[in-house]
Image (cartoon, rainbow, N blue to C red):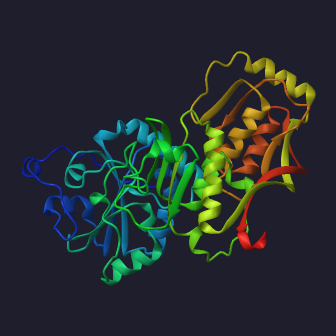
Amino acid sequence: MKFIFCITILLCPCLSKAQPLSIGQQVPSPVMQLLRNNATIQPSIYVIDFWATWCSSCRKNFPAMAALQAKHEGSLKIVLVNSTTTGDDPQKINSFFKKYYATFPAQQPFEQITNDSIFTKLFPFDAVPHYVWIDSAARVLAITGSQELTTQNIQKAISGLALHTVDKSSLQKLEPGTSLFFQNDNKAVLAQSTIGKADTALYLFQPGTVKHNGPGFQSMLAVSQPLLSLYQRSLHLKSNRMRILLPANSALLHKPVNAELLMPPGSSQKEMSIALVKLLNKNFGLHGRMQTIGSLCYMLQVADTALFKKQQKKAASISKAGHDSTFYKNKAPLFITNTMNSMLLQNAGWPIIISHPAFTQNISLLLPSHTLRGNPQALQKALQHWGLQLLQTSRPLQFFVLEPAQNHP
C-alpha cells in the first residue's frame, strides 16, 4: 500500500494572529516546514489544493493534477489541504481515497493535510477548488482556480518566469442578481422580448453560474465558463452525446466565456435552455443543434432469464449497499443506464449505454462502485452476475452537434 502523508493541524500559538497572505508575500517558516515535510530534495514549486470530498470539480481535477506532478517530478509538489470548514472528517477522506486509488491504481498518491485551520487562515477562500502557488523561497507566486493549472504555467513557475494569472483571492463572489451587460438597463422591459449577450472578456468575478428572479424578469448569468460546459448543462447532455466538429485549436474550446440572459417571468427551464443555445450560437458564430445519428452503443438487457429472476428474488432481502457498492433498489432500467452514462464518463470515449425497449420493469441491482467509474470491462462482468449484459449494437440516437456556422449558410 502506497504511503500518503497526512497530518492534522492545530492552530499554533505563533500563527494565531497571522493575517491572510497576498501574492508576493512570504509564507511563515513553520508553515513551510509542514509543506517540506523533512524531504531531502525540495521541489521548485508547491501547489496547495484546497478541496472537499463533496466537490465534484475538485475530484474531476485530480487525475490531471497527478499527471502534472508526475511530468514535473522533483520540481512540482502538490499538497491537498482539507479545511475544517468543509465538514469532512478523516474517516470520510480515507474512504474517498480508498475508492479513488482503486480506480486509479497506478497514480502516485498525493500528500495530504487534513483538519486544517492554518492554511485556511493564511489563504481564505469562498469556493473550492482553490490553488495557492508557492516557490522554494516561500514566496506566494499565484492564487488561482483550476483553469490556470496548466503545463505551460507550471513550467514558467519552475523556470522563475512571471505568471500572468488572475488573482482568485481578489475576485468578487458571484451573487444572484449580479449583471455584466445590463446593469443600468430596465431589465423588465428588455426581458419581454428575451435578450442576451455573451463575450470572452475577463471580469473580476469568481467563475460560476447564477439564476435570479427579479421584478418583471428572470435572469441567468454565467461567468468564465467553458463553452462546451454551457451547452452541455443547458441541454442536460452527457459528454458522449456531443459531437464537436470545431478545429482542435479553436480558441472557443479553450477560452472561458460569459453569457447573460434576460427573460420574461415564469419562463420554463426548457425555454431558457433554448434561448441560451441560440445566444451562444449567434455570438460565437456557431451552429449547435440536436441531430439524430446512427451510433455504436451498448444495450442493457437480460442475458440469462433464470439467473436474472433468481438474483431479483435475492435482491429483495438487501436493504442497503455495503462498502464500495452502489445499490439500485426497484429502479427502472432507464434510470440505471442514465446513471451508468454519468459515472462511466471519466472516459468520455465510452459508448452510450441504453436499455432494451422491451426492458421496462423495475429491477434491483447491487454493483461494486469501482465498476461504474470508467471501467466498462469490470461493469460487464458485474452485470453477468445478475443475469444481465451490455450488448454491442447500433441505433439512431440523439446527439448535440456543434460546428462553425459557415458550414450551414
Q: Nearer the viewer, residue 328 or 381?
A: 328
Q: Nearer the viewer, residue 329 or 244?
A: 244
Is residue 346 in view? no
Name the residue at the top extreme.
317
Q: Position of residue 198 (x, y in %)?
A: 52, 61
Q: Nearer the viewer, residue 120 or 175?
A: 175
Q: Is residue 124 left or right of residue 165?
A: left
Which residue occupies 74% across, 44% down? Answer: 379
Which residue occupies 38% across, 48% down? Answer: 178
Which residue occupies 52% across, 53% down? Answer: 60
Q: Is residue 157 above or below residue 281?
A: below
Q: Position of residue 203 (x, y in %)?
A: 38, 62
Q: Is residue 148 above or below residue 171?
A: below
Which residue occupies 51% across, 69% down? Answer: 255
Q: Is residue 23 left or right of residue 278?
A: left
User: Which quadrant is home to the C terminus?
Assistant: bottom right
Q: Position of residue 330 (x, y in %)?
A: 73, 22
Q: Position of residue 317 (x, y in %)?
A: 70, 15
